[in-house]
């Protein structure tokens, strides 16, 4: 990352993630948000977020750590992890974001359940890219969208994720561009 490049979205892999997956996420993010991306591992362990009773990782404290670990030069931080994430009111989440904040995270665990491990078939890769754009959308203050084809639509299942697009609807696109202009001054 160039020093003082305040318009870079940092992609922070946690665990063993395929370089091709990171490339695909980077390309998707650059296309939708029009900003550069750079891969920087920020957290080496998630043990602080592990809940032994649920055998899952609580995503909210991970976001706090990411936000603190990120360089001030990063406009946003998107973490990708291969472990199962939860928030207390839900059995699991595909990801979580700080609404209008700096950090978000996406888990490949359920989106790639069929293949598992380090291999990401096209369908799983596409799901991870969609959810990465979705969670980053929240950090740019976008909320859930009623349009089932819009990327900001809330998804209960992998089938819902497959049905929606990587693209934002016209309404969400306008909201994003207003927010980008506000933050970057571009
Ligand atoms: Zn959401
Ligand atoms: Zn929308």
Image (cartoon, rainbow, N blue to C red):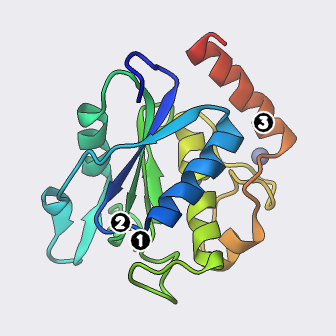
**Could you tell me residue 115's position as x and y percent?**
49, 88
Q: Is residue 120 above or below residue 169?
A: below
Neighbour tally class for label 2: few under 14, some 14-19, many 20 plus, Cα within 10 Å:
many
**Dot 3 surroundings within 10 Å: few (below 14), some, or many (20 or more)?**
some
Relative height, residue 98 to residue 41 (above, below): above
Residue shown at 38%/22% (left/top)?
73
**Which tag, 1 or 2, sits closer to the chain's start?**
2
- Residue 174, image x and y in percent? 79, 29
Q: Quadrant of residue 74 in the image?
A: top left
Reading the image, the residue beneath label 3 is: 173
Of the numbered discs 1 and 3, the one sitting upstream in the chain is 1
- Answer left or right for 74 relative to 150: left
User: In the rendered image, is residue 131 in sight?
Assistant: no
- Rounded to the nearest whole Å, what is the CA distance between mark 1 and mark 2? 4 Å
* Residue at figure coordinates x 14%, y 62% from the top left: 47
How far apart marks 1 and 3 lie (CA) works out to: 28 Å
Q: Secondary structure at mark 2?
A: strand
Which mark is on residue 92?
1
Residue contact at pointers 1 and 2, CB within 8 angstroms:
yes
Answer with the quarter of the image where residue 136 lies. Answer: top right
């Amino acid at each position: 990352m160039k020093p003082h490049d305040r318009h870079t979205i940092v992609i922070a892999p946690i665990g063993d993630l395929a370089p091709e997956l990171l490339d695909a996420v980077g390309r998707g993010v650059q296309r939708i948000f029009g900003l550069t991306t750079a891969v920087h591992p920020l957290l080496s362990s998630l043990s602080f977020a592990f809940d032994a009773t649920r055998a899952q990782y609580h995503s909210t404290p991970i976001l706090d750590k990411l936000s603190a670990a990120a360089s001030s030069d990063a406009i946003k931080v998107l973490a990708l992890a291969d472990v199962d994430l939860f928030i207390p009111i839900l059995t699991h989440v595909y990801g979580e974001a700080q609404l209008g904040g700096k950090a978000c995270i996406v888990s490949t665990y359920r989106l790639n359940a069929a293949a598992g491990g380090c291999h990401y078939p096209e369908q799983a890769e596409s799901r991870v890219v969609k959810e990465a754009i979705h969670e980053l959308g929240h950090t740019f203050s976008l909320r859930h969208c009623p349009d089932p084809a819009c990327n900001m639509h809330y998804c209960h299942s992998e089938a819902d994720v497959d049905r929606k697009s990587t693209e934002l609807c016209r309404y969400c696109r306008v909201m994003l561009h207003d927010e980008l202009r506000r933050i970057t001054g571009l």
